[in-house]
Each structure stands twice: as C-alpha cells, then as structure tokens.
C-alpha cells in the first residue's frame, strides 16, 4: 500500500523542486519540513517582513501573490513561494494569501542549516534547485517585459 503522507520521501520526490534528491536525502531533509493548512484568505507571508527565512511549496489550492496590495500572480500545486527570503537575508518582496483553502509545506531555513552536518549534499541540491527556480522566473519575467515593449 502506498503511503499517503505528503512528507514521505515517495511523495516529496513527486515535487519538481525535489526531483534531483535521493530517498536518503529526502529523509535527511524531512525535519525541516512542516505541513500546514491555510484557510481561504489567510495570510501566508507579508510583504516587507524581515527575518523570516522560510519558503513554502503549495501542495493543494491556489495562493495569490500581492505587491503593494496589487495582485501580480497566482501559484498552485508544486509551485514555490518565498524562496528569495530563504537564499538572501532580505525583506519579503510580496505578500502571499491563500486564494482557496490550501495545503502547504513550510521549509524552515534554520532547520535545513542545522541538518547540513549530516548530509551537506541536501543543502547543495536545495540551493541548486532554488537557483534554477529563480532563474526560470527571471527568464519568464524578462520575456513578458519584451512582449510588453514589443506591443507598444
């Protein structure tokens, strides 16, 4: 019988962010992961907040991304939010609000850092995956800017 635990290595391996991780690495990462449920319209993170260096993976539902109270996007299953604060000690660049009831995985930076002595490859793979994610978002944003400029 297959495990229905969303934080089991088998379940985590289905999330694109973790596709390069071995089962052992996912087990080593497990203490840094927390399953959270958020009701519709609940705040997940607030723009300009400082000091929180965690990020979230949306498992179920949809979240809204807001900058200065203006919706700039939505994210759904397997999407990641809050990754910039995880890699760079900086203020949150956007607020994130549950558009629907959501199930999320919170990834805690302090716990990830503490677990790196056991398996440093986990940290390396996580940072490489986040770097790819940020790079993809940059390319997508750059393309949208080019399209907007070309339409003028």
Image (cartoon, rainbow, N blue to C red):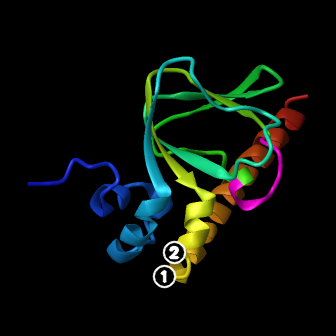
The reply to whether the magenta stretch includes residue 102 is: no
Q: Nearer the viewer, residue 104 or 140?
A: 104
- The secondary structure type at the circle numbered 1 is loop
Provide residue 102's location: percent of width, then percent of height. Answer: 45, 29
**Structural distance between the alpha carbons of marks 1 and 2:** 9 Å
Provide residue 77's location: percent of width, then percent of height. Answer: 45, 39
Q: Main secondary structure of the magenta part?
A: loop
Q: Which label lies toward us, 1 or 2?
A: 1
Provide residue 33's location: percent of width, then percent of height. Answer: 46, 54
Seen as rendered, the residue at the extreme left is 1
- Left of 152 or right of it: where is 85? left
Vertical comparison of 92 with 31: above or below: above
- Left of 92 or right of it: where is 39? left
Q: Which residue is mark 1?
A: 118
Q: Which mark is residue 66?
A: none
* Label 2, residues with CA under 10 Å away: few <14, some 14-19, many ≥20: many
Provide residue 89's location: percent of width, then percent of height. Answer: 80, 57
Residue segment shown in magenta: 86-92
- Left of 27 or right of it: where is 18? right
């Amino acid at each position: 019988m297959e495990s229905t635990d969303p934080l089991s290595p088998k379940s985590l391996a289905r999330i694109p962010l973790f596709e390069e991780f071995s089962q052992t690495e996912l087990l080593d990462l497990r203490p840094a992961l927390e399953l959270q449920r958020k009701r519709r319209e609940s705040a997940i993170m607030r723009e300009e907040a400082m000091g929180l260096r965690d990020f979230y993976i949306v498992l179920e539902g949809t979240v809204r991304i807001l900058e200065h109270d203006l919706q700039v996007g939505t994210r759904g299953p397997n999407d990641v939010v809050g990754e910039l604060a995880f890699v760079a000690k900086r203020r949150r660049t956007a607020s994130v609000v549950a558009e629907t009831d959501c199930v999320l995985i919170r990834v805690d930076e302090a716990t990830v850092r503490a677990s790196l002595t056991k398996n440093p490859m986990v940290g390396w793979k996580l940072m490489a995956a986040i770097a790819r994610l940020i790079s993809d978002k940059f390319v997508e944003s750059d393309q949208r800017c080019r399209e907007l400029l070309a339409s003028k």
